[in-house]
Image (spheres, grey):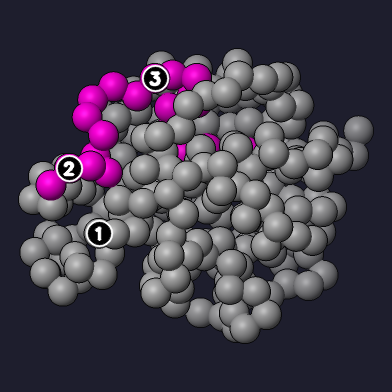
Amino acid sequence: MADTTRNPWVLTPQPRPDASLRLICLPHAGGGATAYREWPSYFDSDVEVKLVQLPGRENRMFEPPHERMDTLVPALADNLGPLLEGRYALFGHSMGALVAFELSRYLDESRRPDVLVVSGHHAPHLERLGPHRHDLPEAELVEALRDLGGLSPELLENPEYLKLVLPTVRADLAVVEKYVWPGGDPVAHDLVALGGDSDDNVPPEDLIAWERHTTGRFRHRIFPGGHFYLQDSLVDVVAEVRRALVEARNNALR
């Protein structure tokens, strides 16, 4: 996809050094940068898309993944470094949404994004109900992943594939499931929440609840589909992200 020798935490499929805005995308649990491989082609030359590659997956498969939010976020902030300066936006789906939100809160006010777009995750102050999936026996975990969607049945029935990916899936799920909302002030930047209308894990009211976490502008949009609705609605989802970037840009010029 891209040269990662300089920074393994970030892939840039289509470098646009003259772009005035960066869009930094964070993956779902068990996912990697390739989840967003098509995104750069949907944006004009004024937006450079950066894909976060966390340890434990794809070209970083043999690095140990993080299991806690309080170690992942500081490491992410340190390794993204100058990408978190100037004008940029964050997008995260599922686990990536929560990580992006906590990353924004971790940063000094002057380094926070123009806008945060969260997808497929309930507002952070809401308690997650149900068993912790990161502790499930393998067969039950595979069934839980099957119910979520996002992976083909063929992959979920491949023992060698599961041997490689399940440790990272468990670690990522632990990041989310051990997370406890610490309280704190809302962020001041804009926030957009997106989700699927048949996502049993994140009903619409749980998306709307994100509004309490910003003093900036907030809106939400529900698309057809389940937890991985964005796979079937990619064009419309990216259009919504583009809209958020334009609004943030216009707001900065006022």
Does dot 2 land on a helix, a strand or a loop?
A: loop
The residue beneath circle 2 is 136
What amino acid type should be assigned to the residue bearing mark 2? Answer: Leu
Q: Residue at the location (60% across, 68% down)?
A: 10
Residue 125 on image: x %, y %? 50, 20
The residue beneath circle 1 is 166
Q: Residue at the location (46% across, 54% down)?
A: 66
Q: Around disc 2, counting alpha carbons within 10 Å, would you say few (fewer than 14), some (14 to 19), or many (20 or more)?
A: few
| The one of 165 and 236 positioned closer to us in this rendering | 165
Q: Residue at the location (81% across, 39% down)?
A: 108
Q: Is residue 251 left or right of residue 165?
A: right
Q: Residue at the location (60% across, 37% down)?
A: 102
Residue 130 on the magenta segment: yes
Q: Quadrant of residue 200?
A: top left
Residue 138 on image: x %, y %? 13, 52
Q: Is residue 196 above or below residue 63?
A: above
Q: Is residue 11 above or below residue 191?
A: below
Q: Which numbered disc, 3 or 1, marks the residue that appears first in the sequence?
A: 3
The residue beneath circle 3 is 127
Does dot 1 land on a helix, a strand or a loop?
A: helix
Residue 163 on the magenta segment: no
Q: Main secondary structure of the magenta part?
A: loop
Q: Which numbered disc, 3 or 2, marks the residue that appears first in the sequence?
A: 3
